[in-house]
Amino acid sequence: MAITTCLWFNGEAEEAAKFYVDVFTGAGRSAKLGAIARFSKAAAQASGQPENSAMTATFELEGQDFLALNGGPHYKITPAISFVVKCDTQKDIDYFWQKFGENGGQEVQCGWINDKFGVSWQVVPTLLSKFMTDPDPSKPGRVMAALMQMKKLDIAKLQAAYEMK
């Protein structure tokens, strides 16, 4: 893969990589932990990070490569970047919502949730794309109105709004 997403952490890279792999494998999705590079004594002194702590951790989610980097406190993760998890069933939405919300995660609005590391996820039904691109403008309008009232998305309510006559 030519492009890898890099997530900047301050001492949590290894924990985050393992968390994401556990969440996705727990859902029966493709995920694996890759290599973990550790700070040598010299690199630790230069960076201010503990010697032998994780400098980087690689992982893969659904075929997408990620690099978790312990780069220090200079930069923070922001909701301006988010990851979309498409779910076929309400059970899948409920699972990801619960896992990302654990241990300090924060529900936002419209299917967005920030996990305990501050990473933003959009947990959405696969059908949402169909609902939002229907050529009848009243259908996407009703779906959006319903969606705006939700934190965790509810497929049945979105479907009802889409099919309303």
Image (cartoon, rainbow, N blue to C red):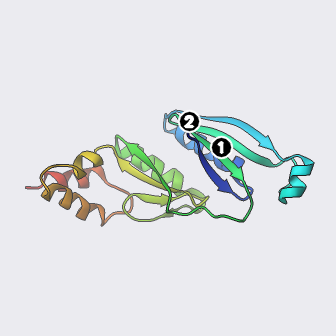
Q: Mark 2 points at which residue?
A: 2
Label 2 element class: loop
Relative to residue 114, is residue 134 drawn left or right? left
| Coordinates of residue 152 in the picture (x, y in percent) | 38, 58
Q: Nearer the viewer, mark 1 or mark 2?
A: 2
Q: Mark 1 points at which residue?
A: 18
Looking at the rendered structure, the kind of residue marked 1 is: Lys
Give the residue drawn at x 61%, y 58%: 117
Q: In which quarter of the image is the C terminus?
A: bottom left
11 or 39, which is in the foreground? 39
Query: Where on the picture, by quarter, is residue 8?
Result: bottom right
Density class for disc 2 (Cα within 10 Å; few <14, some 14-19, many ≥20) is few
Query: Where on the picture, by quarter, is residue 108?
Result: bottom left
Q: In which quarter of the image is the N terminus?
A: top right
As drawn, the residue found furthest toward the left would be 165
| Coordinates of residue 116 in the picture (x, y in percent) | 60, 59
Where residue 30 is drawn, which disc sits there?
none
In the rendered view, tell whether residue 148 sits above or below residue 123.
below
106 or 42, which is in the foreground? 42
Are dots 1 and 2 in contact, CB under 8 Å? no
| Coordinates of residue 73 in the picture (x, y in percent) | 72, 65
Density class for disc 1 (Cα within 10 Å; few <14, some 14-19, many ≥20) is some
Looking at the rendered structure, the kind of residue marked 2 is: Ala
**Circle count:** 2
Mark 1 → mark 2, Cα distance in angstroms: 23 Å
